[in-house]
Image (cartoon, rainbow, N blue to C red):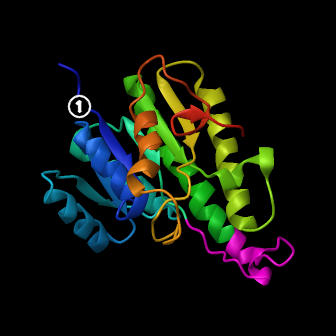
Amino acid sequence: MAETRIALVTGANRGIGLEIVRQLARQGLIAVLGARDPEKGKAAAATLASEGLEPAVVTLDVTDGDSVCEAVAEVMDLYGRVDVLVNNAGILKEGFSPEDSSVFDAPIGRVIETFQANTVGPLRLIQAVVPHMRTRGYGRIVNLSSGAGQLADMGSGFPAYRMSKAALNALTRVTAAELGPGDIKINSMCPGWVKTQMGGPNATRPVEKGAETAVWLATLPEDGPTGGFFRDMKPIPW
């Protein structure tokens, strides 16, 4: 019988993260719901319980190194391993107004805050879980990036968000190079413009579609890709 995999999903109390937990659990993984606010995490888990799914909840603030270590330690205490890490947590604090969209006007504090959540947070999690993955010789890491971070057609607007996601893609490439061709795989993905609290009501994609590629990457077979950037389960330019 195949071993049940343990997946930790960050920022999972709503939106794409919650849907990733739902889809992973439906595929038979034990999905752990990471949430900065434990009460919101429990409330989100309760919505899944009504569907017959029972994810564990851990308090996890990706911008806090101690919180990251404590959350990973809790998952290890519960299950003895972390097989899958989905770095979903992220923030977008920029709007469409001219003063809010120019790199020349970007408040440095907001840029740092965005990098802490969108880039440094995933790095913290990777540093915390990869040693455990190496011990077991298996791991799948998924970084939720964005087309806004693609250098291939980088434009203006949302400078903090764009830079943080481009840096997240760099983290994916660097980590893949260090891990090499073994059975610990890391990839970035773009969910597209999804109808969530961040994406807004005018977004064109349902949350189920936004989560689909992340779930695919989280459950890749041994011959699956690593060090890539994907949308709709197909490679896209960096």
Task: Please tell me which residue is depicted at 39% across the width and 38% down the height of the picture.
Answer: 84
Task: Please tell me which residue is depicted at 58% across the width and 49% down the height of the picture.
Answer: 123
Residue 230: x and y, percent? 58, 38
Residue kind at label 1, given as amino acid type: Thr
> Which sits in the foreground, 112 or 55?
55
Which of the 4 image quarters holds residue 83? top left
Residue 185: x and y, percent? 51, 29
9 in relation to 97, above or below: above
Q: Is residue 130 inside the magenta stretch?
A: no
Give the left or right position of residue 38, taking residue 63 as reference.
Answer: left
Magenta part of the chain: 91-111
Q: Name the residue under label 1.
A: 4
> The residue tagged with tag 1: helix, strand or loop?
loop
- Furthest residue in direction right, as rendered: 104
Crowding near pointer 1: few (<14 within 10 Å), some, many (20+)?
Answer: few
Give the left or right position of residue 135, taking residue 145 as reference.
Answer: left
> Which sits in the foreground, 238 or 70?
238
Quarter the C terminus occupies? top right
Give the left or right position of residue 44, taking residue 116 as reference.
Answer: left
Residue 64: x and y, percent? 50, 64
208 in relation to 94, above or below: above
Main SS type for the magenta part? loop
Give the left or right position of residue 148, taking residue 52 as reference.
Answer: right
Task: Please tell me which residue is depicted at 73% across the width and 58% down the height of the picture.
Answer: 163
